[in-house]
């Protein structure tokens, strides 16, 4: 009987040990979500009126409303047809999946709000400056590679250092 209990303890310990072993994957490599897509991931708002709720059902109160179509958000969790999103200011809430788009956008970020981000003609800081963008400007992301992203928007088109964008991961390639 003591041997039987010991065997059970060994099996239980092995199961617990196995459960705590890291697979070496990051959150972006996580498998099997409701949508079948990786978490976390960036998307954008499809509409200029998106209710953000405190929880993943219509029974939950609307915490706030986004009023800017194309704004990038990061999906951090999924529950059925609901997505928990985080914006560039760190606010989180739940949004119904059909109000989100796979179209990639990003917000220009700067250390100081009054500083301008240079937008270059090419992915090279020695190239001509095509424009200077304010923090908070939303741009459509066309391509990212080797630390640079090509972005477009209302009256601008050019290359920006990837670190100046919230809406793409560091070293992420976007095609």
Image: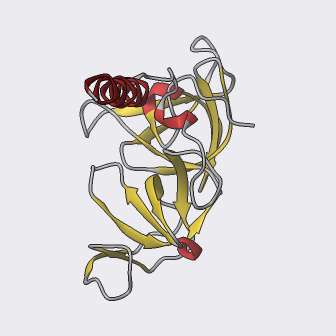
Q: Is residue 19 rendered to the left or right of residue 63?
A: right
Q: How many marks?
A: 0
Whether residue 131 can be seen here? no
Quadrant of residue 157 in the image? top right
Which residue, as the protein is rendered here, is positioned at the far top?
Answer: 126
What residue is rendered at 36% in x and 54% in y?
86
Q: Residue 41: x percent and y percent?
A: 53, 46
Query: Is residue 47 or residue 100 the one in the foreground?
Result: 100
Which residue, as the protein is rendered here, is positioned at the far right?
Answer: 175
Quadrant of residue 128 in the image? top right
Whether residue 63 can be seen here? yes
Which residue, as the protein is rendered here, is positioned at the far front?
Answer: 1
Q: Answer above or below: position of 159 versus 68.
A: above
What residue is rendered at 68% in x and 36% in y?
174
Q: Answer above or below: position of 134 versus 95.
A: above
- Check the image and tell me how it is coloured: secondary structure
Q: Residue 109: x percent and y percent?
A: 37, 38
**Figure quadrant of the C terminus:** top right
Query: Is residue 87 or residue 34 the one in the foreground?
Result: 34
Q: Residue 132: x percent and y percent?
A: 47, 36
**Figure quadrant of the N terminus:** top left
Q: Answer above or below: position of 36 versus 108.
A: below
Which residue, as the protein is rendered here, is positioned at the far bottom?
Answer: 59
Q: Residue 149: x percent and y percent?
A: 62, 31
What residue is rendered at 25% in x and 40% in y?
113
């Amino acid at each position: 009987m003591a041997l039987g209990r010991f065997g059970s303890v060994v099996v239980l310990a092995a199961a617990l040990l196995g459960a705590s072993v890291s697979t070496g994957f990051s959150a972006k490599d996580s498998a099997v979500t409701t949508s079948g897509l990786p978490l976390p991931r960036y998307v954008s708002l499809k509409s200029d009126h998106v209710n953000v709720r405190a929880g993943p059902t219509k029974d939950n109160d609307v915490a706030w409303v986004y009023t800017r179509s194309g704004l990038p958000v990061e999906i951090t969790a999924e529950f059925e047809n609901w997505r928990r999103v985080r914006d560039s200011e760190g606010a989180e809430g739940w949004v119904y999946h059909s109000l989100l788009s796979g179209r990639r956008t990003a917000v220009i970020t700067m250390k100081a709000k009054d500083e301008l981000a240079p937008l270059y003609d090419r992915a090279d800081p020695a190239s001509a400056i095509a424009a200077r963008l304010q923090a908070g400007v939303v741009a459509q992301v066309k391509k990212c590679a080797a630390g640079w992203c090509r972005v477009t928007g209302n009256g601008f088109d050019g290359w920006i250092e990837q670190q100046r964008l919230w809406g793409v991961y560091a070293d992420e390639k976007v095609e």
